Amino acid sequence: MKQLELLWKLQEHDLKLKETKAKLEELAKKGSIETITLKLNSLDKRLKDKKLELEEKDKKLRKNDNILKGLTFQLKEVEKNLYDGTVTDVKQLNYMAEESKSLKEHINELEFDIIYLMEYAENIKKDISHIENECNKMKFQFAKNKDEYNRMTNQIREKIRQEMDDVYQISTEIDEVLYKKYHMLKKNKVFAMAKVEEHRCNGCNMIIPTYLIDNLKRDEELQYCENCGRILYLEK
């Protein structure tokens, strides 16, 4: 294979290598695994917060329930003494009546608070159930995405390894001076060579003079585009 054809082959593999590396970087940037991990961590935090909140509400409910039992017992005792006829003193009866009224008001407030706490706790339980379901779905998706990510990553890495092997193999067959010229142009212009198509350089789209095309056909040393300076390649 002639040097010019080797150079063109080298550029093809260089571009494929660059594209394949870009795919690997893009795959990493998408961060599907990282994104799901962050979401899972966020859900776990929400779940812990909700469970702590539910625990606090349950403690308050138990506390209020015990207070309610005590007040209910006191009310029964007061009303028993108030209505069983054993107490005849008017002042004492009035005091017990006021105490009965106060206890009932307190009991009503507690019962209202208990109902509110029970409803609130029920809503927290629904939230916990919803978050747990979301977590389970996310964990399933995570496992699925992780397997797919690893599979695609391994495929791309294998493709990169193959392209690197091809680049190395072709590079060993190219003249050292020519190889340096190629890399100097590649560094400045991203790709060093341009194909001649319909008498135009596909690197800058300028018309190539006939004499240069004739030289390319005769394989007379390297020919450069007079506009962009890239090495010209004419496919036989």
Image (cartoon, rainbow, N blue to C red):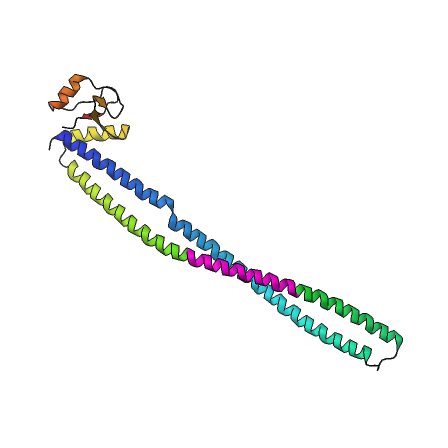
Above or below — where is 181 with respect to 17? above
91 in relation to 44, above or below: below
Is 150 left or right of 173, judged from the image as shown?
right
Tell whether 205 sits left or right of 82.
Answer: left
Which residue is painted at 65% across and 64% down in the image? 115
120 vs 21: above or below: below
Say which residue appears at 28% left-offset and 38% top-offset. Answer: 19
Residue 186 on the magenta segment: no
Picture quarter containing residue 184?
top left
Where is residue 228? Give x, y as percent. 26, 22
Tell me the quadrant of the picture where the N terminus can be found.
top left
Q: Main secondary structure of the magenta part?
A: helix
Residue 52 placement (x, y as % from top left): 55, 62
Q: Determine the residue positioned at 72% across, 76% down.
A: 73
Q: Above or below — where is 173 with respect to 39?
A: above
**Residue in the image at 49% along x and 58% along y:** 131
Q: Position of residue 71 (x, y in %)?
A: 72, 72
Which residues, given as a range, are shown in magenta?
114-137
Q: Looking at the image, can residue 220 be seen?
A: no
Quarter holding residue 50: bottom right
State the residue in front, 205 or 232: 205
* Tally of numbered tags: 0
Left or right relative to 93: residue 14: left
- Would residue 163 be visible to someone looking at this image? yes
As drawn, the residue found furthest toward the right would be 90
Location of residue 202 in the rendering, given as x and y in whole percent from the top left corner:
24, 26
Residue 91 vs residue 188, the one in the foreground: 91
Q: Quadrant of the C terminus?
A: top left
